[in-house]
Image (cartoon, rainbow, N blue to C red):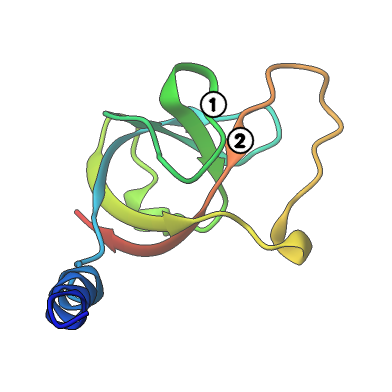
Amino acid sequence: MKIFIPLFIIVLSFTSCKKDKYFEATVLEKGSCGQRLLQFEENLSNVTESISNIYMCNELPEIMQITGLKIRIKYREPQNDEYFLCPDFGIKYKQIFITNIEE
């Protein structure tokens, strides 16, 4: 028990100091429903995998909507009231909500 408490504190300190990770993405063209598509260099771990690591978002600033632009973002899954419906029957990419952007 004497060893468990210090070990628990050390583990807790490492997990609480974890920095948010930025993910690198390339801005692609707009999708069939008008939302900008982003292609990521790696799989997004907490979002359901999308086709070719391509996701759609609708909160990318206009100044960054340049096809081929490399950006770094933090993201989260959309909440239930943030999903947008697309009546198109084409490819359905997963949606993400951008929380922070670096160019």
Amino acid type, label 1? Ser
Residue 69 is drawn in which quadrant?
top left
Q: Residue 96's spot in the image, x, y percent?
A: 54, 49
Q: Are marks 1 and 2 in contact (CB under 8 Å)?
A: yes
What is the number of the mark on residue 50?
A: 1
Examine the rendered structure and indicate whether residue 59 appears above or below residue 46.
below
Looking at the picture, how far across and down is residue 26, in whole percent? 30, 33
Q: Is residue 94 left or right of residue 22?
A: right
Instruction: Indicate the secondary structure of the residue bearing disc 2.
Output: strand
Residue at (29% x, 60% y) in the render: 101
Q: Which mark is residue 19?
A: none
- The residue under the point 24% across, 56% down is 21
Give the x, y percent position of residue 64: 33, 51
Viewer-closest of 93 and 87: 93
Considering every residue shown, the one lying at the far right of the view is 87
The quadrant of the rendering that contains the N terminus is bottom left
* Labelled disc at residue 94: 2
Question: Is the residue 36 above or below the residue 16 in the image?
Answer: above
Q: Amino acid at mark 2?
A: Lys
What crowding class fits label 1: few (fewer than 14 Cα within 10 Å), some (14-19), or many (20 or more)? Answer: some
Q: Is residue 35 above or below residue 41?
A: below
Residue found 69% across the figure and 25% down from its top: 92
Is residue 29 or residue 52 the one in the foreground?
A: 52
Res 68 quadrant in image: top left
34 or 91, which is in the foreground?
Answer: 91
Q: Image check: 88 left or right of 3?
A: right
- The correct choice, above or below, for 59 with respect to 10 in the image is above
